[in-house]
């Protein structure tokens, strides 16, 4: 499960950020899940909570909040904007994008001009949106 | 905040030494040398990983003759498949034969993602096949790989030497370890090489038989190229310490 690897990354980053901000205890962790990466929300949440439970007091009791962010693309050639439609992809392609979202450029094209030269404006992957805590 | 960067050093913890095979120029033999070095070091008894960072033109899998159904295993991240004794990671597992046009920030993002989710085994060396030039990936490799040492590949051509000088200057300025310069595709008619101010670790001959051996590691290892590379590798790296094995008395 690759969700576990990303959950582990979130824990490591939350701990690092908490220390930098001199928090005594983290009470909440908000993670934004970009749609392009198609994270299995339940697995990710479970993984994150399991890992936090095995951590020290700094992050152990943090409540996990997951937000979803729609993935949106913009073509650099014709400026068309469009949304990501995971359902239209075959399972192999969807899985490749799940592991490395940038490989979307190998499979997706601008719906207007067929260019692969587009930007992922929003909703790429896993992002640590905010930490709440006590000083 | 990007959560992935903080985990990269953990993911690289099981690796003793990272060696980036780089050159200022394209086509001088980086990929052939990176893959060849991985094969000969593995043959010498080291535990080896090979990371192909040439996202536009990954080649390691071609030189190793990887069949298409081989894929990383998903297990709390991705576990690189072991091919001819080498743990291999490449973007090609996720792009196949499709061209992958990426702009700078995408290159960086893909690199961070790969490093954040790949779970390497205990390795003596991770050999990194670099793309040509001093762009995104070279700078990112310096930023994200822990203390990489660079082995610089050049050909005998003055055109290649000119750029090698620049790459060496950049690496020294950034205090990056340089293993040395390896001159590839040398022919008997080539003139004496210029001096780079760093150690020249060796010369590899232009080998007519190399092309036919690509994709067949057994045959590749028989080439003059690979034999010479093995001599150079044994001279640079001391033989590995034997791995923990059962006490001799238990061996029947
Ligand atoms: N010593 C050699 N003798 C003969 N052919 C060689 C030798 N070294 C490399 N080649 C051939 O030269 C070509 C380019 O080599 P390779 O792909 O390894 O270069 P590269 O530096 O990785 O290129 P790129 O910059 O595109 O990544 C290949 O076909 C390879 O087989
Ligand atoms: Mg190459
Ligand atoms: Zn377009």
Image (tube, coloured by chain):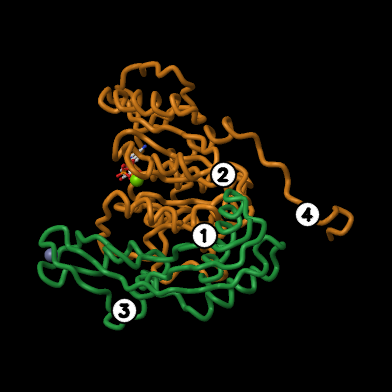
Chain colours: A green, B orange
- Ligand 1: quadrant of the figure: top left
Q: Is residue B248 visible?
A: yes
Alpha carbons under labels 1 and 4: distance apart = 27 Å
Instruction: Look at mark 1 in the image and give the residue it sits on.
Output: B118
**Is the residue marked by circle 4 packed among few (<14), some (14-19), or many (20+) residues within 10 Å?**
few
Nearest to the observer: residue B104 or residue B125: B104
Disc 1 and disc 2 in contact, CB within 8 angstroms: no
Residue B234: image x %, image y %? 58, 34
Q: Is residue A60 left or right of residue B132?
A: right
Query: Which residue lies most toward the bottom here?
Result: A87
Mark 2 or mark 3, which is nearer to you? 3
Measured Cα–Cα span from mark 2 to mark 3: 43 Å
Residue for badge 2: B41
- Let me know if marks 2 and 3 both belong to one chain: no
- At 61% across and 73% down in the image, what residue appears? A49
Which structural element holds mark 2?
Answer: helix
Q: Tell whether B69 sits left or right of B147.
A: left
Callouts 4 and 3 in the same chain = no
Question: Of callouts 2 and 4, which one flags the residue occurring earlier in the amino acid sequence?
Answer: 2
CA–CA distance between discs 2 and 4?
19 Å
Q: CA distance from mark 4 to mark 3?
A: 49 Å
Q: Chain of mark 3?
A: A
Q: 10 Å neighbourhood of mark 3: few (<14), some, or many (≥20)? A: some
Q: Which numbered marker is on residue A86?
A: 3
First reached walking from the N terminus: tag 1 or tag 2: 2
In the figure, is residue B209 to the left or right of B120? left
Cα distance between the residues tagged 3 and 1: 24 Å
Helix, strand, or loop for circle 1?
Answer: loop
Callouts 4 and 3 close, C-beta under 8 Å:
no
Q: Which residue is mark 4?
A: B245
């Amino acid at each position: 499960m690759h969700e576990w690897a990303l959950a582990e990354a979130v824990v490591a980053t939350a701990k690092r950020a908490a220390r930098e901000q001199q928090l005594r205890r983290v009470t909440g962790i908000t993670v934004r899940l970009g749609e392009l990466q198609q994270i299995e929300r339940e697995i990710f949440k479970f993984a994150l909570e399991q890992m936090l439970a095995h951590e020290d007091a700094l992050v152990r009791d943090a409540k996990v909040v997951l937000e979803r962010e729609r993935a949106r693309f913009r073509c650099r050639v014709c400026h068309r904007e469009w949304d990501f439609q995971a359902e239209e992809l075959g399972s192999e392609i969807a899985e490749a994008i799940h592991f490395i979202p940038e490989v979307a450029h190998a499979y997706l094209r601008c719906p207007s001009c067929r260019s692969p030269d587009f930007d992922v404006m929003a909703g790429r992957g896993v992002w640590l949106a905010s930490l709440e805590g006590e000083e | 905040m990007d959560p992935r960067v903080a985990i990269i050093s953990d993911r690289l913890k099981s690796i003793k030494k990272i060696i980036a095979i780089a050159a200022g120029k394209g086509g001088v033999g980086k990929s052939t040398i990176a893959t060849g070095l991985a094969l000969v070091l593995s043959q010498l008894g080291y535990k080896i990983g090979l990371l192909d960072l040439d996202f536009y033109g990954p080649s390691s899998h071609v030189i190793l003759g990887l069949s298409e159904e081989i894929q990383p295993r998903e297990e709390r991240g991705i576990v690189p498949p072991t091919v001819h004794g080498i743990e291999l990671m490449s973007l090609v597992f996720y792009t196949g034969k499709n061209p992958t046009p990426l702009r700078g920030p995408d290159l960086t993002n893909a690199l961070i993602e790969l490093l954040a989710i790949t779970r390497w085994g205990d390795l003596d060396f991770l050999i990194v096949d670099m793309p040509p030039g001093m762009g995104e990936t070279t700078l990112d490799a310096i930023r994200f790989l822990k203390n990489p040492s660079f082995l610089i590949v050049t050909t005998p051509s003055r055109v290649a030497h000119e750029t090698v000088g620049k790459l060496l200057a950049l690496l020294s300025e950034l205090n990056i370890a340089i293993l040395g310069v390896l001159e590839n595709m040398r022919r008997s008619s080539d003139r004496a090489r210029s001096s780079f101010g760093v150690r020249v670790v060796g010369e590899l001959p232009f080998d007519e038989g190399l092309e036919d051996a690509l994709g067949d590691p057994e045959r590749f290892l028989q080439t003059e190229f690979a034999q010479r590379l093995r001599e150079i590798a044994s001279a640079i790296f001391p033989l590995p310490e034997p791995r923990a094995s059962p006490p001799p008395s238990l061996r029947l």
